[in-house]
Amino acid sequence: QVQLQQSGAELVRPGTSVKVSCKASGYAFTNYLIEWVKQRPGQGLEWIGVINPGSGGTNYNEKFKGKATLTADKSSSTAYMQLSSLTSDDSAVYFCARDSSGYMDYWGQGTSVTVSS
Amino acid sequence: DIQMTQSPASLSVSVGETVTITCRASENIYSNLAWYQQKQGKSPQLLVYAATNLADGVPSRFSGSGSGTQYSLKINSLQSEDFGSYYCQHFWGTPYTFGGGTKLEIK
């Protein structure tokens, strides 16, 4: 069965970076894009960007350019999102999701990132 | 960017009732619309894609409709497990955007 397993919760200092992982299983990793979505506490969903694990090609929401960097490792079927220069505005739950022609058919369980000194 | 306006923001209903949630896009999205359900503390789950197609395993009491800029999600005979938040999302080009969400609560 398709699964996306994300890394655990992070507590990080302002100004630092964090890297969230998303390990895929149950399907051919390079055949589907991986999307990343942000959800602040009690708020809605915000699209960060997408990566093609096969080619490494990326497409970002303008709002997250310079903030998020998406990568993928085909050998381990794992997608990554690095967030840099963290502020309190980056405190949120981050989800990875499998893209099935634009809609997201399978989601990871989410990774909570808390930015606090 | 395409804006997705979802209504209502919240809804208080009883088990067995029928509800309709609407989503309006700021431009024609040609049925490139999905609906998701999210329970508290969980990840979103796909309900409907391409405006009218039920995702695998989704009960038939859910249905999606619409075209152009106006879309709806209808839930017939609400069950207790249907309570939570619902979001629409367009995928007519990036950046993808979501509606603001509808919180469905028990009356």
Image (spheres, grey):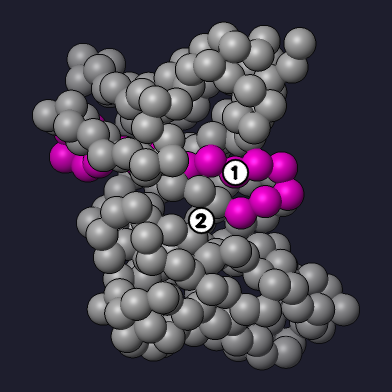
Amino acid at dot 2 = Gln
Badge 2 element: strand
Note whether B77 is above or below A117 in the view shown.
below
Instruction: Identify the image quadrant of residue B78.
Output: bottom right
Which disc, if any, is residue A75?
none
- Decide whether residue A43 is among the magenta residues: yes
The residue closer to the viewer here, A65 or A37, is: A65
Task: Say if residue B51 shows up in the picture.
Answer: no
- Decide whether residue A56 is among the magenta residues: no
Question: Gap in Å between the C-alphas at discs 2 and 1?
Answer: 14 Å
The residue closer to the viewer here, A3 or A19, is: A19
Q: Which residue is mark 2?
A: B45
Note whether B82 is above or below B95 in the view shown.
below
Residue name at image x 63 percent, y 23 percent: A87
Left or right of residue B35, residue A98 in this image: left
The residue closer to the viewer here, B7 or B62, is: B7
Q: Quadrant of the N terminus of chain A?
A: top left
Badge 1 element: strand
Left or right of residue A115, residue A63 in this image: left
Q: Which residue is mark 1?
A: A39
Q: Give the label, 2 or 1, closer to the camera.
A: 1
Note whether B42 is above or below B48 in the view shown.
above
Amino acid at dot 1 = Gln
> Residue A28, position in %: x, y?
20, 35
> Residue B44, position in %: x, y?
54, 52
> Residue B74, position in %: x, y?
55, 85
Residue name at image x 73 percent, y 87 percent: B16
Residues drawn in magenta: A29-44
> How dense is the environment of label 1, judged by Cα within 10 Å: few (below 14), some, or many (20 and up)?
some
* Residue at mark 2: chain: B
Residue name at image x 37 percent, y 60 percent: B1
Instruction: Identify the image quadrant of residue B15.
Output: bottom right
